Image: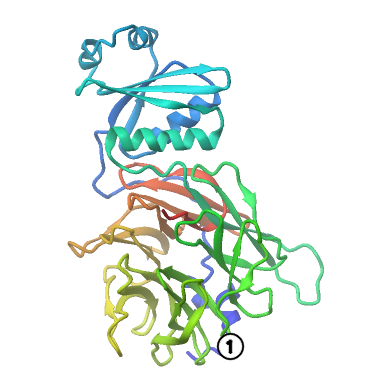
Amino acid sequence: MQLSNFSRVCFNLKSMFILFFLPLLVFGANLEVFLPTRDNLTPVYLSGFTGEMRAVLESDLNRSGVAAVVPREDVLDEALFSAPFDSTLWKKEKIPFCLAAQVVGNRLQMTAFNVAQGTTKKYAPVPLERQAIHKLADAIQKDLFGEEGISSLRLIYTMRKKNLAPAPRKLDWLSEVWICDADGMNAVQVTKENSYCLCPGFMPGSATEFFYVSEKSGQSKIYRASLAKPTGELWIDLRGNQALAALRGSKIAFITDIAGRPDLFVQSLDAAGRMFGKARQLFSAPRATQASPTFSPDGKKIAFVSDKDGPPRIYVIDLDVKKATPQLLTKRNRENTSPAWSPDGTKLAYSAKVDDIRQIWIYDFATGEETALTTGPENKENPSWAPDSFHLVYNTENDEHCDLYVMHLGAKEPVHIGKGRFAAWQQR
């Protein structure tokens, strides 16, 4: 199918290629995990303070995927604050970790006890505000379980709304870039373009610099911006339309119609992030559309969507091989879109249509198995991995609103964190 207008491919909701670029989804709520789960979360006792900030800390620990905060009891509180610390009761209760919290003024003082090892760690007092509590939760998780937490990370995403203002070239919808904490709080609108923005992502190692796609110039283009300068500057300066960017190291992959149809290209970047050399067409096929590239962690391969053999499915191609042949990855379902390669390189998350409903699936590179993560009557799309390769954010959508959910692979249900779509995690 020859496509002469890339913007229509990306933004026309009636197009068959909506599966690639702007999938319309349905609000979701009832989900069930089919992956092997961490059924035995480690009990952690948290004592000593109440209120909103306790709820934040408790929520962070419960959503870590490794810990489960047990209910408070007065007798346990008294035992925890008795001196010296006696591990007998905690061993009897089978609670291996205890957190003694005290509020002094407007600061929280925390002490962690490792019951089995008989060790204690005191943390520097932190202010009673959300971001400080998120950082404390990540520090506790690292110390007690040896795993990096995600509570202090941010998410970047887009929020859309109906365009009610008259205009010579009226868009039915407007969409802007937003950021929020990992739990959906402290949401702030970043861009104010009065246009259609989508597919944002943080620059590596930054919580302030980001890139995104916008059609504010009349064509779909990739822009770069920061929280200090949210008006994006054109980043990829090529003819035609560009969309669906993915960044890894000194390379950016994207889809462009510069050769006549939406194909997969790769552009090298210099140390300042500017275009370096010519963009390289990585893959094209007659009458086919490519979409949604995602890099492997080592930057040597790209997974992407193509309908070159019929329905859209996910393929993998080598970057360093000239005229490389893509290898089919997903075989179980016939319509697969929006792949996301996990940071540890072991898994690929994607959306697949099963019985006319789009669900999040996981491909395991070690076994080649494809496993459903979600079920239920609602469509789910656009999965994105947290740096721990254990948490995912994805969106559901209907004609009125879009909703974001965060889920860890060991949970039975996702956590609704707010409205939005095309979310991506801040990367360390």
Q: Which residue is depicted at the point 32% across and 47% down?
A: 409
Left or right position of 163 against 247: right
Q: Nearer the viewer, residue 306 or 193?
A: 193
Q: Is residue 185 visible?
A: yes
Q: Where does the image place residue 405, in percent across and percent down from the top left?
A: 47, 48
320 shown above or below 337: below
Q: Which residue is depicted at the point 36% across and 82% down?
A: 310
Q: Where does the image place residue 173, in percent across and percent down from the top left?
A: 68, 65
Q: Where does the image place residue 315, in percent across and percent down from the top left?
A: 32, 76
Which secondary structure, mark 1? loop
Displayed quadrant of residue 327:
bottom left
71 shown above or below 75: below
Displayed quadrant of residue 195:
bottom right
What's the amino acid at mark 1?
Answer: Arg
Residue occupied by mark 1: 239
Q: Nearer the viewer, residue 33 or 329?
A: 329
Left or right position of 337 against 163: left
Q: Which residue is depicted at the point 46% across and 58% down?
A: 379
Image mark count: 1
Left or right position of 139 against 50: left
Q: Is residue 312 visible?
A: no
Q: Which residue is depicted at the point 49% across and 62% down?
A: 203
Q: Residue pushed farthest left?
A: 367
262 shown above or below 293: below
Q: Residue pushed farthest front?
A: 271
233 shown above or below 401: below
Displayed quadrant of residue 213:
bottom right
Q: Where does the image place residue 186, in percent across and percent down from the top left?
A: 60, 42
Left or right position of 384 against 242: left
